[in-house]
């Protein structure tokens, strides 16, 4: 490799900054928002707005009145957190629910740990886990896109009735893959449309805000392990929150390892946990908990995978 | 004397200051009634154990003091359990194993070791009362907040109305962890503010 690669802890002065990256991520999430509004109606926009507004207000109020620090709402990180939280919950929830979730995300998972850069866990996922434990009924009521009929999500059908029922539900395998890829399935607001998630992800790759290591090892592990356990690898990747998790949630700069090797380990760990939770645990989907569990290991990974200091010759 | 008494309630509150006896504060503070019950049981146990241990403190050989303390505490706890079983069976049922576990609560042994074994009977009595009351108040506070948020009522009386969607996490130990942490932070913040103004 003879090209100069800039690593996460940048050493060259560049125009990239926290606000630029965060607003870049928000821009990358915009196509997904359009898909959510198209499939689940204008109410989806209300859910996202409720979550974002609550996140921004919570951050501003805590920084201004409790810690008496400068308010850094304009860096966009609270907005990103609010959007990601709203994208990971069902479209039919009452509007106060995302607001409470965002409050927990920002107040407990982010500001209690010292604010942006200090949080151990991904704030949006903490908010989601909190909501799932507190209001399990609202958080597992899935409405189907366009007509709004409630029922089980594809992963729920897989858990309860097996893979053949999933194929039956969609008609045949081809329509299953296309529907999952386009996003015409029951699921959380922003996780259904793999197509537009990938459009956003391409933008992040183009801007070099994320590297291929976490998404590829994450999705690769899921595909490999579900193939080995007799499942359908493509279905496993396209369903649930895998794509959203792989490109937007697990790649969070604060809560994932710094080095490339560390990121590969992180991705493999999340992928393995997702397959394990989907197959053996009580929940049909496990991206949220898998990411949170691997977040706890991030400091350990960073400690043992130390990058070679610049200029040191390998012996 | 008053200072020793108040010490246990505010300055060295077992849960929010010493961070001892966290096990019952996480497990049985899910309703205000359970919190109060547990608090009163511990108030009795810690006060009596402090008084007994300080009155026999010169008779116990230092090398076997911990087993001796534990035996005294265990006798007291067994009395409490038998009493609850006979007169308040509902509380006995909801507290369950945690009544017997009082024998090994760190706060009881800590006060025996740190305070009662070195001080007079009267001082130990005040210390036991203060620590026990501090624990009981903290448990009731936790119980009220958790019951209010987790099931919308306090001491069994519905307060929040029919449309309230209970915050279920508050009924489980993770919710208690969050609450104890937040309250600890709140008290630290309050004390720092208070002492700055002085």
Image (spheres, rainbow, N blue to C red):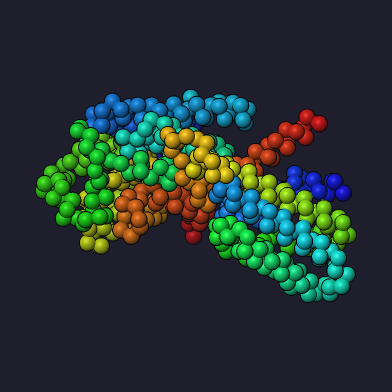
Q: Quadrant of residue A90?
A: top left
Residue sticking out furthest to the front: B87
Q: Estimate the x, y position of residue A127 in percent, counting from the top left.
A: 44, 40
- Horizontal placement of B51 versus B26: left or right? right
Q: Is residue B163 visible?
A: yes
In this rendering, the answer to whether A16 lies above or below B149 is: above
Q: Estimate the x, y position of residue A34 in percent, counting from the top left.
A: 27, 28
Q: Quadrant of residue B189?
A: top right
In-front residue for pair B118/A251: B118
- Horizontal placement of A11 versus A247: left or right? right
Looking at the image, which residue is at 59% across and 26% down?
A: A64
Looking at the image, which residue is at 88% across and 59% down?
A: B120
Looking at the image, which residue is at 61% across and 56% down?
A: B24
Total number of numbered labels?
A: 0
In this rendering, the answer to whether A30 lies above or below B88 is: above
- Horizontal placement of A42 versus A118: left or right? left
- Horizontal placement of A135 versus B115: left or right? left
Q: Estimate the x, y position of residue A115 in percent, counting from the top left.
A: 55, 36
Q: Is residue B18 visible?
A: no
Q: Estimate the x, y position of residue A48 in percent, counting from the top left.
A: 36, 30
In-front residue for pair B170/A230: B170
Looking at the image, which residue is at 13% across and 50% down?
A: A168
């Amino acid at each position: 490799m003879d090209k100069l690669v800039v690593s996460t802890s940048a050493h060259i002065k560049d125009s990239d900054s926290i606000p630029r990256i965060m607003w870049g991520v928000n821009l990358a999430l915009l196509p997904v928002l359009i898909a959510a509004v198209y499939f689940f109606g204008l109410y989806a926009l209300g859910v996202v707005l409720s979550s974002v507004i609550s996140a921004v207000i919570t951050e501003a109020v805590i920084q201004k009145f409790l810690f008496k620090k400068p308010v850094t709402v304009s860096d966009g990180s609270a907005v990103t957190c609010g959007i990601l939280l709203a994208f990971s919950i069902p479209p039919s929830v009452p509007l106060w629910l995302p607001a409470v979730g965002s409050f927990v995300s920002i107040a407990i998972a982010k500001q209690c740990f010292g604010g942006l850069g200090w949080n151990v866990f991904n704030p949006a996922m903490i908010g989601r886990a909190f909501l799932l434990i507190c209001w399990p009924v609202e958080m597992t009521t899935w409405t189907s896109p366009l007509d709004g009929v409630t029922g089980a999500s594809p992963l729920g059908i897989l858990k309860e009735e097996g893979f053949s029922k999933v194929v039956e539900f969609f008609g045949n395998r081809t329509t299953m893959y296309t529907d999952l890829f386009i996003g015409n399935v029951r699921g959380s607001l922003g996780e259904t449309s793999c197509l537009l998630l990938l459009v956003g992800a391409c933008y992040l790759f183009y801007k070099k805000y994320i590297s291929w290591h976490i998404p590829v090892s994450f999705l690769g592990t899921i595909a490999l392990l579900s193939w080995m356990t007799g499942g359908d690898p493509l279905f496993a990747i396209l369903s649930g929150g895998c794509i959203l998790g792989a490109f937007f949630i697990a790649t969070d700069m604060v809560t994932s390892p710094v080095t490339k090797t560390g990121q590969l380990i992180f991705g493999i760990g999340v992928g393995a946990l997702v397959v394990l939770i989907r197959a053996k645990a009580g929940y049909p989907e496990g991206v949220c908990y898998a990411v949170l569990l691997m977040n706890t290991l991030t400091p350990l990974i960073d400690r043992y995978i130390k990058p070679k200091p610049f200029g040191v010759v390998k012996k | 004397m008053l200072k020793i008494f108040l010490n246990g309630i505010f300055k060295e509150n077992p849960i929010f200051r010493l961070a001892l006896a966290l096990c019952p504060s996480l497990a049985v503070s899910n309703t205000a009634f359970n919190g109060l019950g547990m608090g009163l049981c511990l108030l009795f146990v810690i006060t009596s154990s402090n008084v007994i241990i300080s009155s026999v403190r010169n008779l116990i050989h230092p090398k076997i003091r911990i087993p001796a303390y534990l035996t005294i505490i265990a006798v007291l706890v067994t009395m409490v359990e038998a009493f609850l079983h006979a007169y308040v069976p509902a509380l006995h049922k909801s507290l369950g194993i945690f009544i017997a576990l009082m024998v090994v609560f760190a706060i009881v042994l800590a006060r025996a070791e740190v305070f009662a074994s070195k001080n007079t009977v009267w001082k130990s009595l005040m210390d036991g009362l203060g620590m026990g009351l501090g624990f009981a108040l903290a448990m009731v506070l936790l119980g009220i907040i958790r019951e209010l948020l987790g099931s919308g009522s306090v001491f069994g009386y519905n307060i929040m109305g029919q449309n309230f969607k209970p915050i279920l996490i508050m009924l489980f130990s993770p919710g208690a962890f969050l609450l104890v942490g937040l309250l600890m932070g709140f008290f630290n913040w309050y004390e720092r503010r208070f002492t700055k103004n002085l």
